[in-house]
Image (cartoon, rainbow, N blue to C red):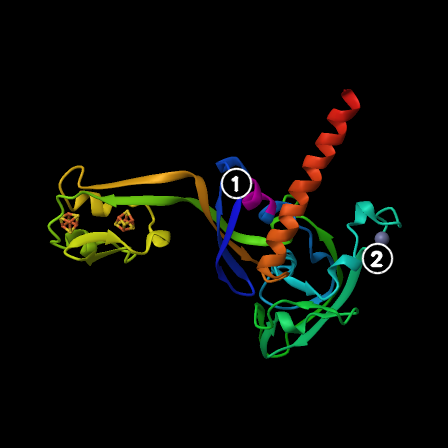
Amino acid sequence: MKFELLHLEEDRIRFLLSGVTAAFANGIRRACMSEVPVLAIDEISLYDNTSVLFDEQIALRLGEVPLKAEELDQFSMPEDCQCGGVGCPGCRVDFMLSAEGPGMVYSKDIVFTDLLVKPAFDKIPIVVLGEGEKLVIEGYATKHVGKEHSKWQAGTLCGYKNLPDISVSQSCDGCGRCVEVCPRAVLEIVDGRAKATNTLECSLCKLCIDACEPGAITLSPVLDSFILSIESCGSIAAKDLVAMASEEIQKRAEDLDAKLAELA
Ligand code: SF4
Ligand code: SF4
Ligand SMILES: [Zn+2]
């Protein structure tokens, strides 16, 4: 397997994986979305809500706020915690939200008892409070994985595509029609002929093929090479998200290996 980093930001990563199957690439994508644990608001107690939103809507909005923990590893998932899931500082972190209108309540108004935990973004709107309207909430966040609920989904936009292989026949006269129709600026006229100079951006839309004579441009996916684009919800860095997803796959493979060894 070969890995090539194409682009890296705090909350997104794009990389090329070669020498793998589609199932493997898809496994990483799925693990990023459903198997990497993060914190999210789990339970709330509403002491006052005179806003225009129902209690349930407030609860839903709070649950979807991505939370960042400087030491995420210090928290266990409730079912794995020494408290047996009853709830303790090892598996939950309490918060308070108290606001009075007029004004917008933002994610930054959620204050956790553990100062190392906070919303990943300050300006996520929760609700607009009119003059004299109040919102007073207590609750706690727990650590789970995305397959249990989307609020624990660490990877948001996660996708992959085959690396395209584009070739242009010798009969090309350099008219430039394919260059004009390409929405991703993949093609250029080089030395009087069309050439793919930005293959990684090709979306396999085939507009270039339709713009020319049949067979002039051929486009095929490289079957064992995939471009993966992974975006984090903001709770953890994108590169850590991919690393944790890969560790989860490795752990499962080792578990399977151990179980098979017992059968031998
Ligand atoms: S491949 Fe076809 S459309 Fe593109 S420049 Fe050559 S002749 Fe023109
Ligand atoms: S398939 Fe679409 S994106 Fe790719 S080179 Fe052709 S026109 Fe451009
Ligand atoms: Zn606990």
Give the residue drawn at x 67%, y 75%.
99
Image coordinates of residue 97 in percent, x first then y, are 71, 70
Amino acid type of the residue tagged 2 in the rendering: Gly
- Which residue is outermost to the top? 264
Image coordinates of residue 81 in percent, x first then y, are 84, 49
Image coordinates of residue 237 in percent, x first then y, are 61, 61
Q: Tell me which numbered mark, 2 or 1, is placed earlier along the sequence.
A: 1
Viewer-proximal residue, 215 or 252? Answer: 215
Residue labelled with disc 2 = 90
Disc 2 packing (10 Å; few <14; some 14–19; many ≥20)? some
Residue labelled with disc 1 = 26
- The image quarter containing residue 30 is top right
Q: Is residue 151 magenta?
A: no
Give the residue drawn at x 19%, y 51%.
178
| Left or right: where 227 falls relative to 182 | right
Viewer-proximal residue, 64 or 236? Answer: 236
| Left or right: where 121 falls relative to 8 | right
Q: Is residue 30 magenta?
A: yes
Image coordinates of residue 24 in percent, x first then y, are 54, 38
| Left or right: where 78 falls relative to 125 | right
Task: Report if the beta carbon of the residue with label 2 is closer than 8 angstroms to ligand 3.
Answer: yes
Tell me where the magenta segment starts and ends, as one range: 27-31
- The image quarter containing residue 113 is bottom right
What predominant SS class does the magenta segment belong to? Answer: helix
Secondary structure, mark 2, is: loop
